[in-house]
Image (cartoon, rainbow, N blue to C red):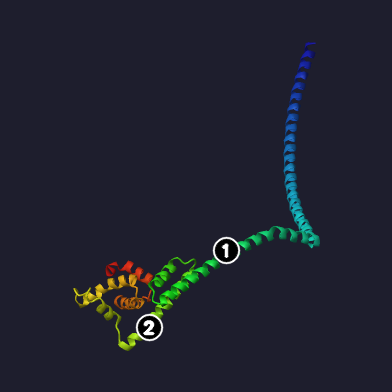
């Protein structure tokens, strides 16, 4: 009995050890199988996902192309339909025509106002020019002022052109007269203001004549004398002043104040 019990214990111990070993081996095999299955499943899922994304992208691109083509086809069909063309034309006429009409009316109104202003200004220029041609100082002052207050650049050029034309006429009259009598504008001015310049010697007289000419150009009422003053000033300053171009004289004086005082 003692020997039998010892054998039974030994057998039980061996069985337990074998069972433990078998269970450990089974657990290891099971873990390896599970890990292998998990890795395979993960790889399969990633492959399936990549394939699915590629297919979805292709489907999306094809769908977008089909949608655009279909939309273009329907638009083309719609515009080939005469009813749609008429509807679009009518809608454009209703929406655009009033806007264009308002814009045209505004442009016409502006053009008419500008034309009326130009006509009025041209009338003033004609009056001033006639007065100046007749020897009136106010005509000269009005033309000089018109260049500064013209309603447009075109009208300013008209005023400047008229003043230049009349000035050239006066210049031709003086040139014609001086050709007969050999009149020197500088000597004529020196003689005219000899009393005012008597305190100066001959070279100084020409220098001090310049301020006198500027004074008389701005206030003298005899337009023929003003013409002589301009011609004398051109000689003394060596500047190509046009007859009656008072603005040019004023600009020159700003840069040569000592000579003008």
Q: Which residue is mark 1?
A: 110
* Picture residue at 33% right of the left edge, 88% below the top: 180
* Picture residue at 76% right of the left edge, 14% below the top: 6
Res 34 seen here: yes
Q: Is residue 137 above or below residue 4?
A: below
Which quadrant of the structure image shows residue 81?
bottom right
Res 81 seen here: no
Indicate the secondary structure of the residue bearing disc 2: helix
Q: Is residue 81 above or below residue 7?
A: below
Q: Position of residue 247 (x, y in %)?
A: 38, 70
Q: Mark 2 and mark 1: span between their CA atoms?
A: 43 Å
Q: Position of residue 185 (x, y in %)?
A: 30, 80
Q: Residue furthest bottom?
A: 180
Out of 172 and 70, give the one closest to the viewer.
Answer: 172
Question: Where does the N terminus fall, quadrant-wise?
Answer: top right
Q: Quick one: label 1, few (<14), some, or many (20+) residues within 10 Å?
A: few
148 relative to 235 in the view: left or right: right
Q: Position of residue 41 (x, y in %)?
A: 75, 39
6 relative to 159 in the view: left or right: right
* Picture residue at 47% right of the left edge, 67% below the top: 150
Q: Which residue is mark 2?
A: 173
């Amino acid at each position: 009995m003692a020997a039998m019990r010892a054998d039974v214990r030994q057998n039980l111990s061996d069985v337990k050890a074998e069972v433990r070993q078998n269970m450990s081996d089974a657990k290891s095999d099971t873990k390896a199988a599970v890990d292998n299955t998990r890795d395979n499943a993960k790889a399969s899922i990633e492959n399936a996902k990549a394939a699915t994304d590629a297919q979805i992208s292709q489907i999306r691109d094809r769908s977008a192309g089909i949608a655009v083509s279909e939309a273009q086809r329907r638009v083309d069909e719609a515009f080939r339909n005469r009813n749609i063309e008429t509807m679009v034309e009518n809608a454009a006429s209703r929406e655009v025509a009033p806007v264009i009409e308002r814009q045209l009316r505004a442009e016409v109104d502006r053009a008419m106002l500008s034309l009326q202003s130009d006509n009025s200004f041209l009338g003033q220029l004609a009056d001033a020019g006639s007065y100046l041609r007749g020897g009136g100082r106010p005509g000269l002052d009005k033309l000089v002022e018109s260049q500064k207050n013209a309603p447009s650049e075109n009208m300013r050029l008209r005023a400047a052109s008229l003043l230049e034309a009349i000035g050239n006429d006066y210049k031709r009259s003086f040139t014609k007269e001086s050709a007969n009598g050999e009149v020197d504008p500088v000597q004529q001015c020196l003689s005219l203001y000899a009393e005012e310049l008597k305190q100066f010697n001959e070279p100084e007289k020409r220098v001090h004549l310049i301020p006198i000419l500027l004074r008389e150009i701005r206030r003298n009422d005899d337009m023929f004398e003003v013409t002589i003053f301009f011609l004398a000033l051109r000689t003394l300053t060596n500047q190509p002043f046009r007859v009656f171009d008072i603005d040019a004289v004023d600009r020159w004086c700003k840069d040569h104040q000592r000579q003008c005082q």
